[in-house]
Image (tube, helix red, strand yellow):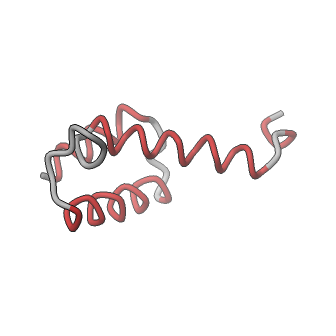
């Protein structure tokens, strides 16, 4: 059934989730605890995790928090 969802929508939802993960982990947004370089590194790390199959917010936040 998920194949009936347009790809653009899925990508938007995934990007929104990844942004929330970065914010929850304190890597971006108004409550950011890292500088721009650290945020960029966190985003790269997050994308690698996501592409490797880790795709829940909880697991991604935990992985980011564990990496620091």
Residue name at image x 30 percent, y 35 percent: 24
Q: Residue at x 78, y 37 (%)?
A: 2
Would you say 44 lies left or right of 10 here? Answer: left
Q: Residue at x 41, y 62 (%)?
A: 48
Q: Residue furthest right?
A: 4
Task: Give the quarter of the image for residue 42.
Answer: bottom left
Q: How many marks?
A: 0
From this view, report whether residue 63 is shown above or below residue 45: above
Left/right of residue 32 with respect to residue 48 in the rendered view: left
Give the image quarter of residue 1: top right
* Left or right: residue 9 compared with residue 19: right
**Does residue 25 sit above or below 34 in this rendering?**
above
Please tell me in which quadrant of the rendered image residue 4 appears: top right
Residue 28 drawn at (x, y percent): 29, 48
Image x and y of residue 22, in percent: 33, 45
Picture coordinates of residue 10 (x, y %)? 69, 44
Please give left or right for residue 10 compared with residue 38 in the image: right
Q: Position of residue 25 (x, y in %)?
A: 25, 40
């Amino acid at each position: 059934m998920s194949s009936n969802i347009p790809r653009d929508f899925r990508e938007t939802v995934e990007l929104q989730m990844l942004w929330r993960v970065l914010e929850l982990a304190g890597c971006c947004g108004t409550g950011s605890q890292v500088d721009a370089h650290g945020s960029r590194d966190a985003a790269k790390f997050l994308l690698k995790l996501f592409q490797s199959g880790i795709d829940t917010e909880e697991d991604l936040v935990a992985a980011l928090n564990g990496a620091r």
